[in-house]
Amino acid sequence: MNWLDSDHRYGAVSRAIHWSMATLLILMLGTEWLAELVGMSEREAMALHKSVGLLLLGLLVFRLAWRRVNRGRLEAPEHWKVASRLGHWALYGMMVLIPATGLLAAMGSGHGVEFFGLPLISPGAEIEWLEDATEETHEVTANLLWLLIAGHVVAVLAHQLWLHDRTLKRMA
Ligand code: HEM
Ligand code: HEM
């Protein structure tokens, strides 16, 4: 098995992180809906939401370090190089901004933050200005992520169905 990226395909580690992060991010975007579906209380759902969100932030740090380790191993697809680079960095940007604003909103709410039961930030007083400033940004950036994901999938489909290149196979 190829752990590292090669000139024609992302390696096993890059692929595993891409698909696990994509799945978790989509589940996170649907937290409210999923919690209702499985009959979870809002409190439980939020605790899980914060833990998985922090896990995603950790996975992202690893993803960016792994990207650096693999730098130059994989050629960019021939078409739309600039657009794809911009699109990917916009996705990375959202993957930093969303959990960061979520963390600040949670601090502002005074409810505290645990990572799968491990206390990270103790509950305290509500900091209204912090909560107001960050909660809205958290929501707006989460909505923006939906748009970017849709654009990303349309680009992949265009590579596959229109350009008939290896873009999808590189990550599949
Ligand atoms: C939450 C959803 C997703 C996020 C945040 C995401 C993010 C990313 C990022 C950041 C890259 C660039 C990787 C690099 O640094 O080289 C990438 C590549 C890729 N993604 Fe996604 N992705 C998501 C969902 C999907 C889905 C649903 C598909 C399938 C239709 C897909 C197919 C691909 C492919 C084929 C590539 C490789 C593109 C290339 O070779 O340049 N992704 N994705
Ligand atoms: C990377 C992943 C994340 C995604 C995609 C995400 C997405 C979302 C979404 C879609 C909502 C619902 C917004 C609404 O309609 O009210 C939400 C709410 C919330 N998130 Fe996240 N989130 C992420 C990470 C985090 C993290 C790491 C934390 C804190 C440690 C957090 C804390 C919160 C809080 C406190 C709310 C409730 C805000 C309110 O009361 O409206 N999120 N998040």
Image: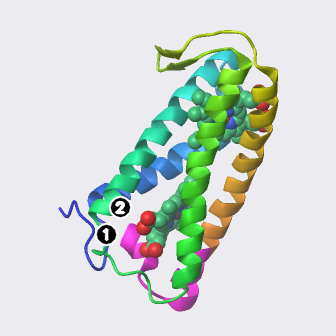
* Highlighted magenta segment, given as a residue range: 155-172
Nearer to us in this view, 160 or 78? 78
The quarter of the picture where residue 149 lies is: bottom right
Classify mark 1: residues with Cα within 10 Å, few (<14), some (14-19) or many (20+): few
Q: Residue at x 66, y 69 (%)?
A: 151
Verify whether residue 57 appears in magenta.
Answer: no
Quadrant where the C terminus is found in the figure: bottom left
Residue 39, placed above or below residue 21: above
Predominant SS of the magenta segment: helix
Q: Amino acid at mark 2?
A: Arg
Is ligand 1 less than 8 Å from the beta carbon at label 2? Answer: yes
- Name the colour scheme: rainbow
User: Element type at marker 2?
Assistant: helix
Q: Which mark is residue 155?
A: none
Label 2 – label 1 distance at C-alpha = 6 Å
**Mark 2 — residue?**
67
Q: Amino acid at mark 1?
A: Arg
Residue 10, placed above or below residue 160: above
Q: Residue pushed farthest left?
A: 1
Nearer to us in this view, 92 or 11? 92
Q: Residue at x 80, y 39 (%)?
A: 136
Q: Which mark is residue 71?
A: 1
